[in-house]
Image (cartoon, helix red, strand yellow):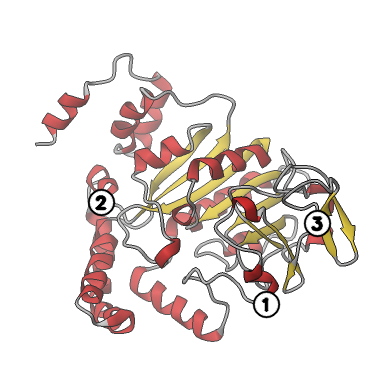
């Protein structure tokens, strides 16, 4: 099903500033409360898509859109050259197989739902491994990003999503959380706009160098990523590219640091594409500790993970999936090991 247009989801839209209702004024949307600082005077359009951003609380400025420009975050393009560059990148680092598998799982879980609606945050381009979602004829996709494209519904800042509570059956947020200043605020917003049994998939860099210049802020270990989604129950989690992919990234960025530039560094890295295949032979625990990125697939929960749980989580996340399931069924550890013991064991 094609990505929805803003006019098709009017009932789901809310002001990003006060969460009040929106009304139409000519070709623009505005907050029904004219006193609202975010949208009382109306929201601008960019490429005929509404820019539902509270600029008083955003990294971006309204003139970046009203002047006919889009924010230069250094990582988006929909041009033919951009597509070729993406293919070259996949040739070097491979396709996101974790995302592909979880996308298929997500689609299967949505089949029993009536008229499911999925929010893709950071959907200015179709992410690696998510193609199957866009091929579904019975799933409505609402896509947001900080720039307009042929596959976005509207422009939004993920810190303050312009949707009413409980709007979506699932949310897909891929390679986005590294680009936000306050990831916990973003995840709280995901929790807010999901239905009670809503699903979420997120993948985020861990052992990755800066790739979006001034708009690159965060990295997450597997445990930190799990803690970020502590208000969600886990279905699955793991690595997106292991130690081999991390080594390949480091080699490319080492060449860049020598002054070779991105194009030459990438070209000189191509002969070492095989390093990523070594991830198949790594041990799960050590591979997670050196993962290039991490993913989380889970469901909205009303129970929040306790800080003590995250210590036990580190151990179980390094086990094979079957062992993890057995330990989860047995319940949490009664007494978490002291941090000092864990450090000593690592020496």
Q: Can residue 324 be seen?
A: yes
User: In this figure, which residue is indicated by the disc labeled 1?
Assistant: 68
Helix, strand or loop at mark 1? loop
Q: Is residue 60 left or right of residue 260?
A: right
Within 10 Å of the Cα at label 1, are there few (<14), some (14-19), or many (20+) other Cα atoms?
few
User: In this figure, which residue is indicated by the disc labeled 2?
Assistant: 290
The answer to the question of whether label 3 and label 2 lie on touching residues, with beta carbons closer than 8 A, is no
Q: Residue at x 74, y 42 (%)?
A: 19
User: In this figure, which residue is indicated by the disc labeled 3?
Assistant: 41
Q: Earlier in the sequence, mark 3 or mark 1?
A: 3
Q: Is residue 219 left or right of residue 59?
A: left
Q: Residue furthest left?
A: 347
Disc nearest the viewer among 3 and 1: 3
Q: Residue furthest right?
A: 26
The answer to the question of whether label 3 and label 1 lie on touching residues, with beta carbons closer than 8 A, is no
Q: Residue furthest top?
A: 334
Q: Nearer the viewer, residue 208 or 105?
A: 208
What is the quadrant of residue 264 in the picture? bottom left
- Residue 27 vertical position relative to residue 232 in the rendered view, above or below: below
Residues under labels 3 and 2: Cα distance?
Answer: 49 Å
Q: Nearer the viewer, residue 18 or 283?
A: 18
How far across and down, in percent of the image, does residue 73 sit?
49, 68
Q: Residue at x 62, y 68 (%)?
A: 147
Within 10 Å of the Cα at label 3, are there few (<14), some (14-19), or many (20+) other Cα atoms?
some
Q: Residue at x 58, y 54 (%)?
A: 58
Q: Can residue 148 be seen?
A: no
- Residue 89 vertical position relative to residue 152 in the rendered view, above or below: below
Residues under labels 3 and 1: Cα distance?
Answer: 19 Å
């Amino acid at each position: 099903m094609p990505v929805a247009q803003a006019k098709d989801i009017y009932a789901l839209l809310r002001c990003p500033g006060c969460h009040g209702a929106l009304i139409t004024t000519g070709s623009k949307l505005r907050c029904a409360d004219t006193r609202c600082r975010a949208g009382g005077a109306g929201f601008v359009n960019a490429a005929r898509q509404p820019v539902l951003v509270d600029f008083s609380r955003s990294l971006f400025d309204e003139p970046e859109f009203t002047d006919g420009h889009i924010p230069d975050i250094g990582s988006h393009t929909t041009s033919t050259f951009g597509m070729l560059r993406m293919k070259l990148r996949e040739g070097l680092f491979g396709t996101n197989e974790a995302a592909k598998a979880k996308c298929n799982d997500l689609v299967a879980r949505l089949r029993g739902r009536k008229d499911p609606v999925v929010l893709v945050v950071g959907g200015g381009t179709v992410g690696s491994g998510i193609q199957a979602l866009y091929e579904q004829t019975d799933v409505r996709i609402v896509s947001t990003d900080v720039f307009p494209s042929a596959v976005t519904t509207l422009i939004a800042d993920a810190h303050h999503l312009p949707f009413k509570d409980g709007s979506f059956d699932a949310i897909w947020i891929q390679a986005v959380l590294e680009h936000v200043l306050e990831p916990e605020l973003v995840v709280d917003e995901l929790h807010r706009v999901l239905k009670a049994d809503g699903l979420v998939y997120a993948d985020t860099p861990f052992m990755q160098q800066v790739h979006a210049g001034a708009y690159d802020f965060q990295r997450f270990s597997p445990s930190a990523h799990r803690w970020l989604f502590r208000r969600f129950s886990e279905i699955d989690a793991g690595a997106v590219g292991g130690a081999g992919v991390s080594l390949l990234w480091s080699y490319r960025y080492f060449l860049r640091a020598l002054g070779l530039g991105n194009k030459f560094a990438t070209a000189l890295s191509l002969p070492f594409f095989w390093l990523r295949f070594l991830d198949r032979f790594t041990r799960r625990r050590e591979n997670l500790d050196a993962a290039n990125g991490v993913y989380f697939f889970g469901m909205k929960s009303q129970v929040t993970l306790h800080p003590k749980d995250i210590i036990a989580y580190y151990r179980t996340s390094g086990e094979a999936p079957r062992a993890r399931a057995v330990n989860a069924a047995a319940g949490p550890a009664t007494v978490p090991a002291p941090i000092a013991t864990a450090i000593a064991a690592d020496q």
